[in-house]
Amino acid sequence: MKIDLARFRETFFEEAAEHVATLEQGLLGLERPDADPDLLNSIFRAAHSIKGGSGTFGLEQVASFSHVLENVLDRMREGTVQPTRARIDLLLRSTDVLKGLLVSARSGEAAPAELEQVLADLQREQASGADPAAASAAGGEGASEHAAPPQATNAPQLRRIHFRPASDVLLSGLDPILVLRDLASLGEIREVTCDTSRLPSLTALDPEVCHLAWTVVLSSDACEAAIRDVFAFVEDGADIQVSVAAGASAAASTARGPAVNERATPKPTADATAPAAGPAFRRRASDVEASSSIRVSIDKVDRLVNLVGELVIAHSMVADVVSHFTLDKLDRLQAAVSLMGRNTREMQERVMGVRMMPIGSLFGRFPRMVRELSGALGKDIQPEMSGEETELDKAVVERIGDPLTHLVRNAVDHGIDDVETRRAHGKPEQGVIRLAACTQGGSVIIEVADDGRGLDKERIHRKAVERGLARADEVLTDEQLYALILQPAFSTADKVTDLSGRGVGLDVVKRNVEALNGSISITTTPGRGTSFRIKLPLTLAILDGQVLLVGEELFVLPLVSIVESLRPKRAHVKQVFGDGEVVMVRGDTLPLIRAHRLLGVPTEVIDPCEGLTVIVEHEGRRVALLVDDLRGQQQVVIKGLDVNYRRVEGVLGATVMGDGRVAFILDVAGLIRMTDPDAVEARRALAHARAETSYAPAAAAA
Amino acid sequence: MARTALIVDDSISMRQMVAFTLKEAGFSVIEGENGQDALTRADGQKIDLVITDLNMPVMDGITLIRELRGKPAFKFTPILMLTTESQDTKKQAGKSAGASGWIVKPFDPGKLLAVIGKVLP
């Protein structure tokens, strides 16, 4: 049978990635004083599984590397060697190489450059202290006894084979007759005699015990080892003798039996067909592309299938009522529709859930990073994690990785002091960085906290003044003050270290979080530590929106970008050069954007003092957006414009409101860019797009 | 009537590969992701062949083999262990737990079926 194994390789790669993560996390965990004694076993199992799978799926390089790795781990598991820091370092480097080898096997990229060095180090580790013979034997252990096809000798030989299986052979699921058949596949059986001498009388017979023995005369060109191999499963407790039969050669014994087939070639055993599977391992382009797949647990799929079932039932209830509808059935119709509504909502949530993945997959990278960074800085830091099972949209998980990395680096570098300073402050020498995630309503909260020195308010204020972010006499609330460190180009580190402070500040984190419609806040206690709290939407497909009314049209603003809304006093609205307008808000001068004008919507509310101005913020820049009125806040499902229409500057997407109307979701960053006098073209495109997609008659536009 | 095989491995890819091969060979297949899971799924089923990995979380293959062999329904059922360890210790442990034989990884479908042929008529 020819089976293409390539189809299983994608699953293997996904699995292998999980095993590599287990390896890495396990190795890091070994250094903890409270390490689980079973940890080494699970580390070993991970390496072992990669080895087994890669061998089976034809990934030679991965297989041979993981084999050496497994041997080293095995010695550690047996207690022959201890998991010292140096060994763990080497094993972590090996994990990296293994990761690289898997990538290269999947994508066809070159093998990682460190492969040879790490492999050499591993082999040295494998051989060190071990009996050299054992080490080399271990190296050859991968070769299986079934791998070698029976060696053919030139001429068929006649052999007499005596076989008395163990009396309990049947109780291990084996049937001696199959062994005899297997023997027959090696050549030609000339004679079989069954020894029944030990068979008891029927009354004394225990049918579960084997009382028989056989003597077979076999003509075969297979070597003795191949013949003995047939008995591999039954040899325990068995009496097996193989001897060359009198007459020595099969040809010489022709007189005894029917015409001998001189060619007497053994039927090829399955082993002989093994090399034929080789071409099946050849890479296909589709293998690589499939990496953008999602693995969904069977449970999730099952629940969806159940829901579909319920939805079908709910629908048939509605259909039933409607088909013979009379007014007195209104109650039933309402009940049926409401059931259907419930099912639909649950279905929506579940379908979203399919895209969800646990944030633990992301957290996994941090222990390693913290270990290496803190080592380089002479600090002792223990990462602690909780809420790894918290689920987030796959896209969000992928894009929050960099901001989190930045925050963790920042905590290692600036948050936590070195051992001496901590000791001097009477704190435990080991610092702690805590990563926590939890779900709160429709959002996920991720917290990166350290027990370090906390933020220095005075220094932040001084720096902010230096950078022109605040005035010297300005009194700021703590919250406002801390928010300053998230401003572009703000860095409190006095010296540039290797880790952070290379001009890339926390403002990048803020920008990335906001790009995901999230927000970030800081709390700190001097001497006790700092905590960054990131709030993210569960999914990018749904947004907390504020519905706005302009003329007869509805628009949506992401709630996170709204600072406040107010109705300015007439004295606070000022005309500046050209047709520019500004609004004074508590001493700040903010550009006024008239939504009706920008979006080309006719309205009667053109006086800022009659409508409402919504103050929106992006990357520290604020503008006031004049709208007619605010409507409710609600979650909206974002539909991309670029797919269904085209990309429009200033618009995040569109959504369908409850009454069927399409509303634009405004992109605050884009709106702010449009205040630039040069953005004429973008403004025109936006108004045009609005008119084209509007329900309202565009011709009425003033 | 189609024969039924119980395949136990914590690796999905390995399980898929073995399951696929056996289905092609006319078996119907029950899959378990560890020993404990396999025991639950095998309960009350008529099973003609068991193929199990040894290194698994929750319940390992050796324990599974011992548990199965202790059940009257599995007294004579061929049980093959999947092993990368050709060292005698693991094989011996499996054998004394009641395994019929072993399949050494890496293997391909042809080899798998050949070994099955040694224990199943």
Image (tube, rainbow, N blue to C red):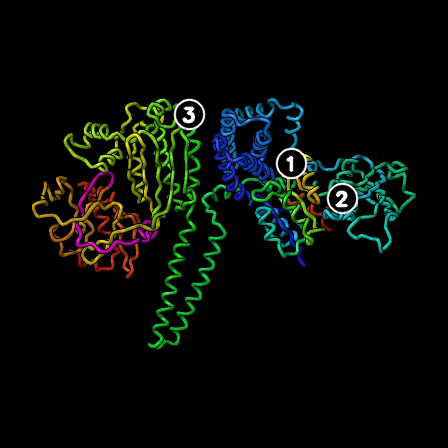
Q: Amino acid at mark 1?
A: Glu
Give the residue number, with chain letter if any, for mark 1.
B85
Quadrant in which the C terminus of chain A appears: bottom left
The vertical placement of A237 against A328, above or below, is above
Q: Please, what secondary structure does the residue beneath circle 3 have?
A: helix
**Label 2 sits on what residue type?**
Lys
Q: Chain of mark 2?
A: A
Residue reaching furthest to the left: A571
**Which residue in the protein does label 2 denote?**
A267
Q: Residues within 10 Å of mark 2 (few under 14, many from 20)?
A: few
Observer-nearest residue: B101 or A543? B101
Query: Visible in this render: residue A5?
Result: yes
Residue drawn at (38%, 65%), measured in percent from left and top? Answer: A339
Part of the protein shown in magenta = A618-645
Q: Are marks 3 and 1 on the same chain?
A: no
Which quadrant holds residue A125?
top right
